[in-house]
Image (tube, rainbow, N blue to C red):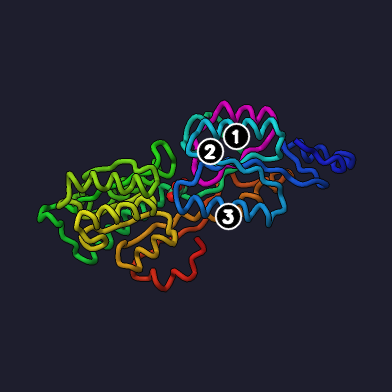
Amino acid sequence: MRISKSLLALGLGAILASTTFAQAADDKIVIGFSQIGAESEWRTANTNDVKAAAERAGVELKFSDAQQKQENQIRAIRTFISQKVDVIGFVPIVETGWDNVLREAKRAKIPVVVMDRDLKVSDDSLYVAKIGTDQVEEGRKAFRWIDEYVTKNNVKPRNGGKTINIVVLEGTVGASAAVGRTKGFNEALAASSNKDHYKILASQTGDFTRQKGQEVMESFLKTYRNDIDVLFAQNDDMALGAIQAIEAAGLKPAKDIIIVGADAVKGMFQAMIEGKANATVECNPLQGDLFFETCKKILNGESVPKSVYVEEGVYDASTAAEVFPTRKY
Ligand code: AHR
């Protein structure tokens, strides 16, 4: 921790007493950031944004890529502690398992700011703030879009049965982006007046990657080729992988099977423009500016909200071509 000597000399120590952290006015802020990896187009956009925002903020960024392993993130956080960085930022790959390492950061008086995914800790004071997206709401939005589309277009089950059959490609097991989207989707389905009109046939992880999305969709199609009406992929990369599997099975994506993804990355816009996907629920990766602004406020002893969600929308094929040129990721 670096406490501004000039502030202390001015007898303003009492002001800082209410907060644990303070920023040196004279030297560059050092921020350690543990990213989870590069599993998706979204993640690449998030990493690029963090790096560019660090430059804009004029801070020194120590960036670490955990290659999808929680133990690598824990190791990176311990390294940041030993390097005595000013703030530690990280994206929790999964919700649980952070208490010990965050206690170590707290003991070292290094504030922690969480980005993107949520975490569950026994004591909320183990992190100062969280910047991210409302992943439960993203799941709700996905179901609501499907329900509205099915109702408006009077979509009938392909197999002639009574229910619109849905398959779900889930994200990384234990990740809040998967847990939250599943929860929100199921909640909105249960709350719908049309709930008996839908059935979830299968739900399995595709680990947020294009390749696993394709593989799991291939296996869904082996069992349910003529029964699937809707795919909800919890990210666009898995949706794009699934589109390949659907085409290889001789079916038409977005026509035989309604495809809804999450993220709103450019690749999904292209698929919508080509008529191969129907909709995507936005998950905004541009969280870097807010992250560094929050870090600076914490170091200045200012209060910050415990949790901030960035804004996001829902996009579908009807406006994809028009919206595409405005997309930043
Ligand atoms: O945590 C955000 C999710 O992680 C994005 O939806 C996904 O693409 C990424 O891998």
Q: Secondary structure at mark 1?
A: helix
Does the numbered disc 2 mark a residue whose Cβ is under 8 Å from ligand 1?
A: no
Q: Which residue is mark 2?
A: 66
Q: Disc 3 marks which amino acid?
A: Asp
Say what amino acid the circle numbered 2 marks. Ala
What amino acid does circle 1 point to?
Ala
Of the pair 316 and 294, the residue shown nearer to us: 316
Label annotation for residue 76:
1
Viewer-side residue, 265 vs 291: 265
> Which stretch did the figure color magenta?
98-121
Q: Report, in whole angstroms, how far the alpha carbon at label 2 lies from the one at label 3.
A: 17 Å
Q: Earlier in the sequence, mark 2 or mark 3?
A: 3
The circle drawn on residue 49 is: 3
Q: Position of residue 255 (x, y in %)?
A: 23, 63
The reply to whether discs 1 and 2 touch (Cβ–Cβ < 8 Å) is yes
**Secondary structure under the numbered disc 2 in the rendered image:** loop
Residue 6 against residue 161 in the figure, above or below: above
Residue 220 in picture, x, y percent from top left:
23, 45
Alpha-carbon distance for marks 3 and 1?
20 Å
